[in-house]
Amino acid sequence: MDASAALSPPAGSPLQRFANPGQFLRLSGRVLPFLAVPGLGFTLVGLVWGLFFAPADWQQGDAVRIMYVHVPAAWLASFGYLSLAVCSVLSLVWRHPLADLAAAEIGPVGAAFTALCLATGSLWGKPMWGAWWVWDARLTSVLVLFFLYLGHIALVRAFDDPQRGYRAGAILALIGVVNLPIIKFSVDWWNTLHQPASITLTGAPTMYVGMLWPLLLSALGFSFGFAAIVIARTRAAVMEHRIRGLLMARAQEADAR
Amino acid sequence: MTHLPFIVASYGLTVLVGVAFSLDAWMRMRRARRRLAAIDPRARRP
């Protein structure tokens, strides 16, 4: 039995259906407005609510309003890397052709959200801690995440043969996954200047509900926006891939004549 | 509002990143669709 056939997605599975670029373009074209419009709406409502209507913090004053952009950016930085790792598994195990293109498009968006998280964290840290930056476990692990994104972006573009770049990038992405629990638990494992999590899956939030709602709306909007940007970029990459293939085929035909 | 410059800078950066990536993705998609339609007639079909 051919090894690549054994590894390809099972026939009729959603994985196989989405491996067809035409099918992906049709489906993603339908889904995109349902991600982009709520993304913009939720983000706008969340940020306006957080900026003008949510209460100031009794200790931090209005600087706490930076939370409504910093926390969603931080969540998306980690979530983006997790989706990069999922694409890497799909690419390495099932040789899924769209997973490589999607991973290459997630990288820059994830890096931008991580940079945004670091920058807004720095802008929050200066008035609260008196320092733009401290080598605290949370900040340092997020900086490592940013470098992992940059490494992935560089690796997938470093080879003449794109497949070798995708393979190298996928391996780096999977190795880097170990950093995600370090980021999550850094505030529990070490004494950090960064505060511990206020929202957990297992316990009740330790945040006033008037601050929690705009934060959740903003995070929802950021998530929809992130997905919309990645899908739009992947759609463009699929079409660009098709254009390169057609031009290459035409050039080979012309050479053969 | 206290710490206004820090808040304005944070929100400004966020808007800048969001708008820049959205515009870039939209323009890339439009450019690719046009080029594909120009070289592959099948791509013009809905």
Image (spheres, rainbow, N blue to C red):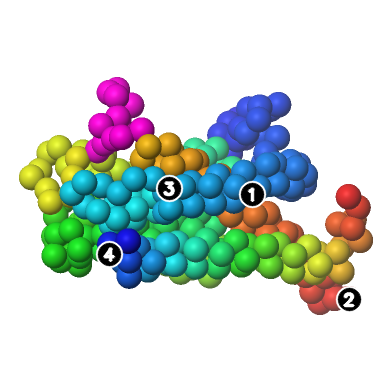
Circle on res. A36: 1
Residue at position x 39%, y 45% from top? A54
CA gap, disc 3 and disc 1: 25 Å
Residue drawn at 91 percent across, 52 percent down: B45
Could you tell me the amino acid type at mark 3?
Phe
The three-letter amino acid code for the residue at tag 2 is Arg
Label 1, label 4: how many angstroms apart (C-alpha)?
32 Å
Give the CA separation, mark 2 to mark 4: 70 Å
Amino acid found under the numbered disc labelled 1: Ala
Q: Nearer the viewer, mark 2 or mark 4?
A: 4
What percent of the width, then of the height, locates residue B13? 43, 67
Mark 1 and mark 2 lie on one chain; the one further toward the N terminus is 1
User: In the image shown, does B45 or A33 lie closer to the viewer?
Assistant: A33
Q: Between tags 1 and 2, which lies in front?
A: 1
Marks 4 and 3: same chain? no
Depth check: B37 or A124 in front? A124
Name the quarter where the N terminus of chain A is drawn: top right
Tally of numbered discs: 4
* Residue B10 visible in the snapshot: yes
Q: Which mark is residue A53?
A: 3
Of callouts 2 and 3, which one flags the residue occurring earlier in the amino acid sequence? 3
Mark with earlier residue (3, 1): 1
Residue B3, which numbered label? 4
Residue at 37% x, 37% y: name it.
A210
What's drawn in magenta, residue-wise? A197-209
Residue B4 placement, left or right of A102 = left
Q: CA distance from mark 4 to mark 3?
A: 16 Å
Tell me the amino acid under the disc marked 4: His
The residue lying toward the viewer, choosing from B20 and B9, is: B9
Label 3: chain? Answer: A
